[in-house]
Structure formats: structure tokens, C-alpha cells
Amino acid sequence: MVDGRYLIKSRIARGGMATVYLALDRRLDREVALKVMHEHLAIDAEFVSRFVHEARAAARLSHPNVVQVYDQGSDTVVLYLAMEYLPGRTLRDVLTERGALTPRESVSVLEPVLAALAAAHRAGIVHRDVKPENVILTDDGRIKVADFGLARAVTAPISTTATNELLGTVAYLAPELVSHGHADARADVYAAGIMLFELLTGKQPFTGPDPLQVAYRHVHEPVPAPSSLFPDLPAAFDQVVLRATDQNPDHRPPDAAILLADLHAAQARVPAPQLDHRAADAGTLRLDAARTQVFSALSGTPAGPAAATTPQPTRALTLSRRQARAHNPISTHPTGSHPLTTTGSRVPLLPRLSVHDSETAPPGFLGERHRQAIAAIAGALTLLLIIFTGIWWFTGGPGSYTTTPSLTGQRLDDAQRVLSSQGLYGHENDAYSTTVAAGQVISTTPTAGQHVKKNGTVQLTVSKGPHLIAIPDVTGKTVAEATTQIKAQGLTIGTTKTKFSGTVAKDMIISTSPKAGTQIAPDRPITLTVSKGAQPVLLDNVVGQNVDAATQLLKSKGLVVQRAPDQPATDGTAPGTVVLQDPAVTTPNQTVNKGSTVTLTAIAQPAQVTVPNVVGQQFDAAKQQLQQLGLSVNKQGGGFWGGGGNTVVSQSAVGPVAPGTQITLTVN
């Protein structure tokens, strides 16, 4: 179990930097490919820092032809990367099984690889270890590129002062990676060109028993055209290979997208039958004899034919000066070269030439021939001095350049540390951003991968977070007035909607959304709600209805009801009947504004008498009190003959009644 989450099921492969396992992510219940770095890398603090940064960059790279990075972490000394698990086989497996592919098949394989690299280059990511071993052909027919960011993590900078190591796969190393250790997207283009050569011919252009010799040939020998090995191959693909593998990076396509366009153009120029012609399985590179002799003289090892390709691991190369001198019998002044090594074999990558007289002059004698030789030697030494001074000036001196690292999304302190580690300086400029968090780098000038002088300055545009502005209060203003005021604040008007309002006049602003006072980003649109005025409602004619029922009906429609003084009945109309309303209904479907007032006039109710509670009084006293109020009294109870008690125990009514109403008193 790794990090309490990944359950190892089996080992898939082991390479120069890591071992890959099939593991079960127990948290998400899915299979992943878990790449575990070798322990000597996991305990290197500088490597861990670069690895974490590059893993994050690779995780942000989303493309259908890129193996997705899910997670990165560490568990004690275990440093790992959790990636998409893709059952299938590598392009190396296919080449080992089939040898050369047809041109059509080569294009179909390289096309998704270049599409993946193009996406990476647009994001400022350089793969640096493009090779068939990192191209996966899945069981369901997809093609994906793996290990984005990993090689860069190991090789940024490509050579370290501690070990003078260079990591990469020598068969695909661009010359600039070998000579000065810095590279950009054009190094991936070079490796892709080597892959195209290998797909078409079934062989690598440069092979040998010693990786350093192979690296040396990348620096000093141009890659031959595929048709020089197999004349039947279309010449159009020669142009693509030769341009992609030009030793001068400035002469190559600047990124994988341009190389992909070149590949499509070449395919379009080749007749269909030739696209399906497959190169022979056997053959050797037809190297120019003079070039072969030069290589043999400089390296001390004969340059034999290209051998059959085998899986190419990413490996480290280093060099010590003393052992370089011991290995190279020609070089007598081994200074100033870039060191490269393999374990147990140390040879100079860029050997120096020395001049030896072909004859020895007699003691004390200097003939004309010897004087000419000395003059030639002096001239040659002067020329070499000029050349090496120029090389030093442009590779390690004041005129040398490096490439701008990818800093987008990093916090300012981290970006400054990365620049400082590469001998660069960062100058900060602040800018608002709605997509990049405050304190993180939005962009750099020069951009990632572009050249910048060593000890030069990189302009860092750092996010201040979103620029927030308070929405002004435009309630009661016209749309034109509100628009002018909002735009003056640097804000944006979005949609406009309307709404009835009994308090805001028609065509005036009721409210904004978000509401006034809210702080928002300038590009967030503001919605205006405009008044349509008061809402109209149908006015009912309630004349002749009971005043209480009429009042309830009008209020249910949002109208305000007022009562005018009642009128006395003159024509027998029942009390409480509405006889007038204002406004009166004069036309069918007549409307008034919601909230309007309607005044009702009704027939007055007759005067009423309030019956007091006389229970408990003597009948005679209670009767007298009620009769004085204009009421009539009826007596009940008191026994069969009227005898018995005379106290009122109940009465027929209490409260308001019409004058003259008969009140029944029960006595006991």
C-alpha cells in the first residue's frame, strides 16, 4: 500500500528513473498506473521540488492523446505519480515486432503524438524524452503519449553542478541538449523527426555500443534521409525528417503543430500506392565515406552501420576531465567541453584537436618547411582561440542565452526561486485577473520556452485578484441615465427586464441585479429591472350589492375601499345596500390601476337599542328598565298560578336590537 491509498497489484515495467506498477486507487475504486521514483531521486530535495512543479503542470494538460496525470504525492521516501492506466503496448513493442511501417501507417501513428506535443507546447511544457517507449497504443485503438513533465523535472537544468549528469534517451537527444543542456519545444521536434525516421526505415539513424558515441554523432553528424537507406521511400518524407532533425534548432519547425502541418503536406504530395509501400526489413545506413572516417578519427571508434533498435532507457551520462584525456588519444587540451558520462565508460563528448608535426627537424635546424609548419600551427591556434572564445561567449559567457521557465500559475515567491536557480531575475508587474488567484503569476515576458540572456530579467505579471467595483444605486432613473452611470464605473450592462410597480413611475429603474452596493468584477453583466407602471385590474360594478360583500370583492383585486356617509332609505331599498361607487363603471371591461381607491355609498342601517343584561334582577325592576329603552317585555315562569319566585333567571336577547323588539324574561 502506497500513501494509504494505492494498493499495488503487479509490476508493469522498470526504467532508469522509476518503476511502474498497476495499482488500485482504493479511494476512487479505479485502476491506475503508479510510477514510483527510484529512491536516490526521491531523497534529492531539488529533484522533488522540480518533480512536484512539473507534475502539477502535466496534470493541467488535458488532451485526448496525453496520458492523464491524476495525483502526485510522497510516502516517506516513496515519491510517486498516479496516472491513467492504459492496457496495451508501446510503440517500441510494435517496431520490435514489425520493423518498418508503411508511410501511411507512420503518419497515422505520429499524427496523434504530434497533436499531444502541440498541446503541450502551447501550454509551455516541453517533454524532453520523446521516444517509442513513451508512446502507448491502447487495446481499444487509441494512441497516447506518457511521461509529460517527468524528463523535464529530472533535467531542469539539464546538467546539474553536483553530478554533471544528463538524463535522456541518447537515440533521440537533440544536439542542443547534448552540447549545452538547455532546450525548448524544438528538442521535442527533433526527437519526433528521429521517430519518423525509425517508423519509415525500422532503424535509428545513429546507434553504437557506447551511448556517448551516439550522443556525439547527434551533435556532429546530420541525420541521413530515409530514402538514402531505402530508395523506394517517398522523397517528400525526406524533407520532413531532415527539417525536423536539423542540427541548428532555428532551422527546425518551432513546435510540434508546425511539424504536424509539414507531415500532412508531405502525405498529400505522395501518390496513394507509395503510401502503402513498406521498406525492406534489412539494410544499413549509407553514410558518406568521408564523414565515416571523420567520425572514426575523432571518436577513436569505427562508425559501423545502424544496429537493430532495442528499448531505449532514459539514462544518466557524466564525464571527468582526467578520464576524458585518457580515452581520447587526439585531445591534449581537454578544457571547456560539456561533460557527459556513462558508468564505467568516460569519453569526451566534444573532443579538442591538437596539431602534431609530421616530421621532426634536426637539432638546431629550422628549414623553410618547418617555418611554414610553425606559421600554420600559429594560425590554426589563433583560429581555435577565436572559435573557443566565441563558443564560450555564446554558451557560457555574457552573450549566452537560456530559456524562460514555465512559471504561469506559480506563487510569486516560488517563481522567483525558480528564476534565481537558473541565474535569472524577476521584475514584478501587477494586474487584475478573474481567473488567476491573487499572488500567482499570470504570464511572463519572454514567455515560457523563449530565449533570454543568462543573468537577464524576466517580467512577471502577478495577479492582484479580480478587480471588484461597487454597483451604483440607479433606482428611479431612466434606462439611459442608469446605463451612463453604470458604464462610467467601468461596469457592464447585461439584460433589461420589466415589471409592474405601484411605487416607481413607468420607464424608471426599479432595481438592479446584483443589487446596488454589491462589489463585482467589471465583466460581470448587470441586469436592470424597469417599471411598467401600476398594474391594471378590472373594475367591478358593485352598485346594488351588500356593502360588506362589495368591499371584500374590491379588496381581493388589490384596490383600496373607502366608505362615504350612508344615505337614509327613501325608496324601500334594504339597509346596507350600495347605491353609489366612485369611480363608477361606465364602459365594459373598465380598468383602474392596482392600488387605486374606490369609494362606496350605502343605505343607512336603522338605529338600534342595546339590551342590557337584567338576569338576577326582580322582574318588575327589569321590566321597567327595558320599557324605558323602547322595548316590550314578556314574562315566563313563576308557577302555574303565577306564584313562586320573581327573579329573572334568563332573557331572550342581549346587545343591539331594533327599537320595539320584544324581550322575553324568564323568572323563577
Image (cartoon, rainbow, N blue to C red):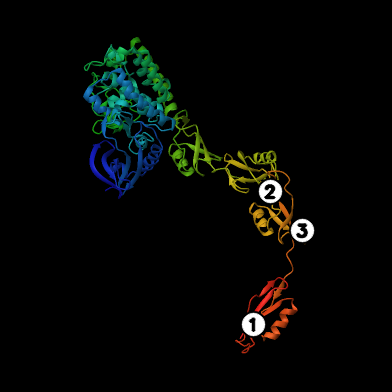
Most foreground residue, 462 or 110 = 110
**How far apart are the alpha carbons under marks 2 and 1?**
51 Å
- First reached walking from the N terminus: tag 2 or tag 3: 2
* Secondary structure under the numbered disc 3 in the rendered image: loop
Task: State the residue at coordinates (66%, 55%).
Answer: 555
Residue pointed to by mark 3: 571
Quarter-of-image position of residue 145: top left
346 left or right, relative to 177: left
Amino acid type of the residue tagged 1 in the rendering = Val
Graded by Cα atoms within 10 Å as few (under 14), some (14 to 19) or many (20 or more), the crowding at tag 3 reads few
Residue where numbered disc 1 is placed: 615
- Distance (Cα) linking label 2 and label 3: 27 Å
Identify which residue, 425 or 295, lies in the foreground: 425
Given residues 256 and 66, the one toward you in this image is 66
As shown in the figure, which amino acid type bears the numbered disc 2?
Leu
- Mark 1 neighbour density, 10 Å: few (under 14) some (14–19) many (20 or more): some
Q: Nearer the viewer, mark 2 or mark 1?
A: 1
Circle 2 residue: 539
| Residue at the image position 28 percent from the left and 24 percent from the top | 214
Up the image or down, 125 lies above or below 520; here it is above
Judge whether residue 353 can be spotted in this image. no
| Disc 2 + disc 1, Cβ < 8 Å | no
Closer mark to the observer between disc 3 and disc 1: 3
| Horizontal side, residue 635 vs residue 202: left or right | right
Horizontal side, residue 307 vs residue 66: left or right: left
Label 2 packing within 10 angstroms: few (<14), some (14-19), many (20+):
many
Where residue 509 appears, x then y in whole percent?
Answer: 67, 44
SS for tag 1? loop
Which of pointers 2 and 1 lies earlier in the amino acid sequence? 2
Of discs 2 and 3, which sits in the foreground?
3
